[in-house]
Image: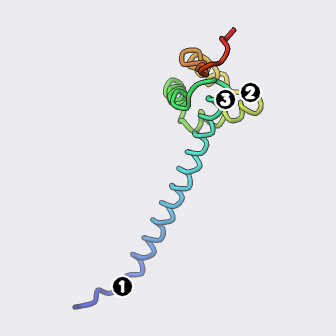
Amino acid sequence: MARVPHDPGDETARIFELRREAGQLKEAVASHAVVDQAIGVMVALGRVTPDEGWVILREVSQHTNIKLRNVCEPILIWGRSGEMPGRIRVELEALLDQHGPTRIPGAPPLE
């Protein structure tokens, strides 16, 4: 079997491609964590289910034309400080009114 000559340029290109892919994966993992945390804020402060929290965040993103991660980051800040950009706040309040609050079985009636 004849041996194909080794091209170091191919290896270099492959290394750059693998580094690019690794960077994209790191960004995706970080973005996923931010979204998951924002869902948790929706559950805790908005009193909705995790599935409803996901739907609400997705709809806020779609209605405001803001990327999901860029909607979720200020929501995490809101959970700590109570401050949120007006555009996101208005849409979020409307959707929380529409979807929640979820009642916990056996909980006393809401006032």
Judged by depth in the image, the label closer to the viewer, 3 or 1, is 3
Residue 103 location, x and y as percent?
60, 19
Residue 93, position as x, y percentages in the image: 62, 18
Q: Element at badge 3?
A: helix
Quadrant placement of the C terminus: top right
- Is disc 2 surrounded by few (<14), some (14 to 19) or many (20+) residues within 10 Å? few
Residues at marks 2 and 1 touching, judged by CB atoms closer than 8 Å:
no
Q: Is residue 21 left or right of residue 102?
A: left
Q: Which residue is mark 1?
A: 6
Residue type highlighted by circle 1: His
Of the image marks 2 and 1, the number of the one nearer the N terminus: 1
Question: Dot 1 lies on which element?
Answer: loop
Rendering quarter of residue 84: top right
The label nearer to you, 2 versus 3, is 3
Residue drawn at (23%, 91%), measured in percent from left and top?
2
- The quadrant in which the N terminus is found is bottom left
Q: Where residue 68 sits: x, y (%)?
A: 54, 35
Q: Residues within 10 Å of mark 1 (few under 14, many from 20)?
A: few
Distance (Cα) linking label 3 and label 1 = 58 Å
Which quadrant of the figure has residue 12? bottom left
Q: Which residue does the numbered mark 2 point to in the structure image?
A: 83
In the drawing, what numbered circle is on residue 64?
A: none
Do the numbered discs 2 and 3 sit on residues whose CB atoms are within 8 Å?
Answer: no
At which x and y percent is residue 63? 51, 23
Side of 54 where 76 appears, left or right: right
Q: Residue furthest front?
A: 106
Say which residue label 3 marks.
Answer: 44
Viewer-proximal residue among 77 and 63 = 77
Label 2: state its secondary structure. loop
